[in-house]
Image (spheres, grey):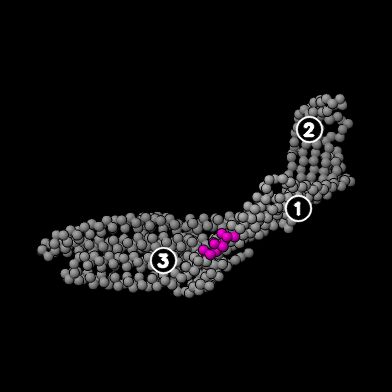
Amino acid sequence: MNKYLSLIIILAISFSASAQMELTLTDVIELAKEQSPSAKSAETRRKNFYWQYRSYKSNYNPSLNLSGNLPGYNRDYFQVSQDDGSFAYRSREQLSSNLNLGLVQPIAITGGELSVNSSMNQFNDLNADASITNPIYNSTLFNVRLVQPIFGFNDLKWDKRTEPLRYEESKRSYVEEMEAISAEATRRYFDYLNAQINLQIAEFNLANNDTIYNIEKGRYNIGTTPKEQLLQVELQLLRSKQDAAQASLDLQTSRLALRRFIGLQESSSNTLQLALPEELPEFDVPLDKALAYAKQNRADYIEFERRRAEADREVARARANRVQTNLIATFGLNNAAGTIPDTYVDPNNQQRLNLTLSVPILDWGRTKSRVQTALANQELTTYTLEQDIQNFEQEIITLVNQLDVLRLQVEITKKSNEVAQERYNVTQNRYLIGKINITDLNIALNEKDAAVRSYTSALQSFWAAYFNLRRLTLYDFLNDELLYQEKD
């Protein structure tokens, strides 16, 4: 089913007749992944990296370039040396133009460049005598040119090591970002759910304290309750009103934050109701499998390899810059004539060979310093990566060990919540018949509220750890499947 159609169905089912939107944790996560600003930002970054990779791939393909100057006009005075050693100045007025078509192919293995060119040049001296051929054309039928650095740094060679890693890293990072969005959606879901529960608690306590106040007021009137206890209950009622008002404000704030994160417009015509995700997924997480999947799938491990390659590249660059030698060789056919067709008649050979060299004889240790700096950075990168890998593995180990404890905490706090609720009901009944005082009832009430919050907090911790495990391993242990499939 189309993912957008799925979202429409989720939203359609969520709206009840009373315009109340009921969402589960799964619904919120799916909405966040599809239409949240964070998801759209992740998708944009994914596209950027894709086009950067396409740009890198294009660097190894030939390019056809057309360049020229159409036309160039020059009018000035120029200096002419005379036979007696003096100088004279003469005017000149010229037109010139040129056009060049070149096919260029980079050579990835050597870092050189091979090109095939064809060009046409035209020169017209507007002040020339009639006896001089004017204009004159110079054409190069074809020209094969090789530019090859010797012992130089080969960018294309090193890009082949780093850029595929960078692109692969970006694809895995995208999946990790989506899992991070799931974790953030879970956090915001529970923020709103806690606010929702706190409001329910505050409203219950307000109604309960109002009832207790009326009871104590009646007892005070018949002389069975002291004034001090009545004032205590009244103060408790006022605090309950304050708590209810604050809880209502917190709920509105959390609702707005959740709606904005998942991309829903705020509307006063409907309310948002969340369900408590009490059903925990059953799965086993062997530590060795978690570490293996993390090393196999995580972008961090690709990043580690890329950073090593980049450190090696900088060392190679520093060493290559010590001596700069370039070989430039050209062979072609060219000619000059008074007309364009004549320039292609019986063309002459055109051959050039140049070897340029640049060697520092005395640079006061500058070249050595650059090389040693690159080597030091390479060594630092190695140590840093080793520490990063250890920290990463420790994070996995800690999280795996926590999962069973968190699951147990959910079971314990759930049972505690049930016991606290039952204890409060018993205590309340005993208070109504006058067997216990208001202090004991308040203790039971506070314990009941704390138990509810502890249970919700335990659920939040478990679900946060669950999605964090998915992000760290890019593996769904519940469905036993990879979250990232490597593609070409």
Magenta span dominant secondary structure: helix
Residue at the spot x=36%, y=66% of the render?
Answer: 456
Circle 2/circle 1 CB separation < 8 Å = no
462 relative to 221 in the view: left or right: right
Pick whichever, 220 or 270, lies toward us.
220
Residue type indicated by callout 2 = Gln
Look at the image and tell me whether residue 253 can be seen: yes
Residue at the spot x=78%, y=34% of the render?
Answer: 95
The span from disc 2 to disc 1 (Cα, nearest Å) is 41 Å
Q: Quadrant of the C terminus?
A: bottom right
Q: Which residues are magenta?
A: 382-392
Mark 1 closeness class: few <14, some 14–19, many ≥20 residues within 10 Å? some
Residue tagged by mark 2? 94
On the image, the x and y values in percent for residue 206 come to 25, 61
Pick whichever, 170 or 375, lies toward us.
375
Res 437 → quadrant: bottom left
Q: Secondary structure at mark 2?
A: strand
Marked residue nearer the N-terminal end (3 or 2):
2
On the image, the x and y values in percent for residue 487 come to 61, 65
Marked residue nearer the N-terminal end (2 or 1):
2
Residue tagged by mark 1? 150
Q: Residue furthest left?
A: 222
Residue tagged by mark 3? 461
